[in-house]
Image (tube, rainbow, N blue to C red):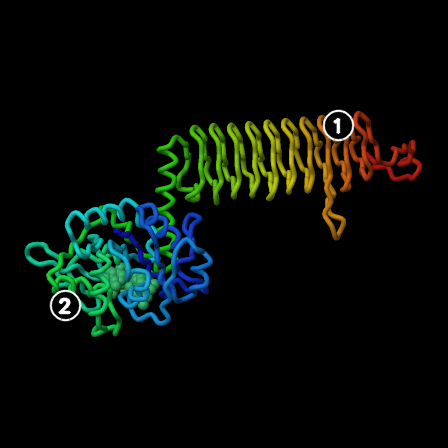
């Protein structure tokens, strides 16, 4: 059987990130660098990916779990040495292996597939992905003969004056015939300026054996961008972001200001929705059709129906159903379920609560651990007092209830269907359905009190 394997190198320390964490677990557009790379090879149809891990291997493993296999490189003795560590997964296999680095998140599945196709149709033993760069400093150079055939790759620090001028560089990504690669790795040595086992030397070894080595050039040299520091991380995130926004725009979403809009890779948005400036959509958030999101909205892991408006608000791990209006300045916290045609107005905080269809929570309200029915009106300043200092309690408000302004609902308490609560009440006991509850001091008038006290202001 012909296998298609991938070996992804991710054992290096990535010193220039100046981070406590593994370089490849840094995120761009909601995904770690290693996830971007693994996703590209997976979409290209690879059977198994082997990650070569070393520095902070624990973090890489935590990130990728058992979706991939792991080879451990105790000492970082070079890219060739790194691939050797994956031998146990390759040695009994026929077919092809893609080798790439864990810090190149911009590589696309399309380029990986094209490379495999090119490799097969040319009967190559090895194919290297290359790019022409105006400034090739730091990269290995592709040395070709007069006929354009690849001869070898020379590392920047090992180049002579003539080789230094070569603009075509090694991306560090390759396709190999598995058997040929394993043979070539056995012949590697570390006789170079860094004393490392260079994977790049395998190409010359294969050529000297009379095998065919080719190169495929990427059109967009961004694809091979490797992340070494935080500035490059931001640069890569920006390119990924543009790809994501472009995909949504091509699929029928209006994005008013792409420059100030951030959408994670897994977000889904229905057609004719409009995303206003300053909007951040994170995780696996889904948004329906005909929505207006933003300006300045942040949605994390949330589900939004059709025709929803969310302005200047934050929605975390919650759902908002069709034709509901949220904001400006609302905060919907995890575990909330907001129904259809609901109005959540300004300075309203909702935590782990259910809000029924057509209910209005128009201003200055806190609702925590509550179940609010349909068509309820919660007046300005209603507070669900859900915390007694040690425990959280649940409050239930029935359908069609009318809760006046500035009411405290001291949990646990039940308000029946169609009940009314007078403004300013502090409710501590059940309010039966269809009743009116008033729980406050009666108003007292002291006639001419100011005059009798002699404290009236002179005109
Ligand atoms: C390598 C190539 C160079 C190419 C460049 C592209 C070699 C010898 N050189 O150089 O031709 O232009 O990539 O970016 O291959 N790694 C390990 N274990 C090791 C060494 C490296 O896992 O022992 C991993 C690193 O974590 C990294 C990748 O391999 O993800 C590349 O290593 P790096 O040291 O950055 O190689 P370059 O010097 O950039
Ligand atoms: Ca590098």
| Residue 20 coordinates in the image, percent (x, y) | 46, 65
Is 395 left, or right, of 242 in this rendering? right
| Residue 283 coordinates in the image, percent (x, y) | 48, 45
Q: Is residue 262 visible?
A: no
Is 450 left, or right, of 334 in this rendering? right
**Residue projecting furthest to the left:** 146
Which structural element holds mark 1?
loop
Nearest the eye: 45 or 204: 45
Task: Residue 438: name its quadrant.
Answer: top right
Q: Which residue is mark 1?
A: 417
| Residue 181 coordinates in the image, percent (x, y) | 22, 61
Rate crowding at label 1 as few (under 14), some (14 to 19) or many (20 or more) other CA atoms within 10 Å.
many
**Residue at 88% over, 33% down:** 442
Which structural element holds mark 2?
loop
Q: Earlier in the sequence, mark 1 or mark 2?
A: 2
* For discs 1 and 2, the disc positioned in front in the rendered view: 1
- Residue 160, numbered label: 2
- Residue 396, numbered label: none
Task: Residue 187: name its quadrant.
Answer: bottom left
**Residue at 38% over, 52% down:** 234
**Residue at 82% over, 28% down:** 436
Is 117 left, or right, of 32 in this rendering? left
| Residue 122 coordinates in the image, percent (x, y) | 15, 49
Question: Ligand 1 closer than 8 Å to the CB at disc 2?
Answer: no
**Residue projecting furthest to the front:** 1
Nearest the eye: 459 or 338: 338
Q: Number of callouts in the render?
A: 2
């Amino acid at each position: 059987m012909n296998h298609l394997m991938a070996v992804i190198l991710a054992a290096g320390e990535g010193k220039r990130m100046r981070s406590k964490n593994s370089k490849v677990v840094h995120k761009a557009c909601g995904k770690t660098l290693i996830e971007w790379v693994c996703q590209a090879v997976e979409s290209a149809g690879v059977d198994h990916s082997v990650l070569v891990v070393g520095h902070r291997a624990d973090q890489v493993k935590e990130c990728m779990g058992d979706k991939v296999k792991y080879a451990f490189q105790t000492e970082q003795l070079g890219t060739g040495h790194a691939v050797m560590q994956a031998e146990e997964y390759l040695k009994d296999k026929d077919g092809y292996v893609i080798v790439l680095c864990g810090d190149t998140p911009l590589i696309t599945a399309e380029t990986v597939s094209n490379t495999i196709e090119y490799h097969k149709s040319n009967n190559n033993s090895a194919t290297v992905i290359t790019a022409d760069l105006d400034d090739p400093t730091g990269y290995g150079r592709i040395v070709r003969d007069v006929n354009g055939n690849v001869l070898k790759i020379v590392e920047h620090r090992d180049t002579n004056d003539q080789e230094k001028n070569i603009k075509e560089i090694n991306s560090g990504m390759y396709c190999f015939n598995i058997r040929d690669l394993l043979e070539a790795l056995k012949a590697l040595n570390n006789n170079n300026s860094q004393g490392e086992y260079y994977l790049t030397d395998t190409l010359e070894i294969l050529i000297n054996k009379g095998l065919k080595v080719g190169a495929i050039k990427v059109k967009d040299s961004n694809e091979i961008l490797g992340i070494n520091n935080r500035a490059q991380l931001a640069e890569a995130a920006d390119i990924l972001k543009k790809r994501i926004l472009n995909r949504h725009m091509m699929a029928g979403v209006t994005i008013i200001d792409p420059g100030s809009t951030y959408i994670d890779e897994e977000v889904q948005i229905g057609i004719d929705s409009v995303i206003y400036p300053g909007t951040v959509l994170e995780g696996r958030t889904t948004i329906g059709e005909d929505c207006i999101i933003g300006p300045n909205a942040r949605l994390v892991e949330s589900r939004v129906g059709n025709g929803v408006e969310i302005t200047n608000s934050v929605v975390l791990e919650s759902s908002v159903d069709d034709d509901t209006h949220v904001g400006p300045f609302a905060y919907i916290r995890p575990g909330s379920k907001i129904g259809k045609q609901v109005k959540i107005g300004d300075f309203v905080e909702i935590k782990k609560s259910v809000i029924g269809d057509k209910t209005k929570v128009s201003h200055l309200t806190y609702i925590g651990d509550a179940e609010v029915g349909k068509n309820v009106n919660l007046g300005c300043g209603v507070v669900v007092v859900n915390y007694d200092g040690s425990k959280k309690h649940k409050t239930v408000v029935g359908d069609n209830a009318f809760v006046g302004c500035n009411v405290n609902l001291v949990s646990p308490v039940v308000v029946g269907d169609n009940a009314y609560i007078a403004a300013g009440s502090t409710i501590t006991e059940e309010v039966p359905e269809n009743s009116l509850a008033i729980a406050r001091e009666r108003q007292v008038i002291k006639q001419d009190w100011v005059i009798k006290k002699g404290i009236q202001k002179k005109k």
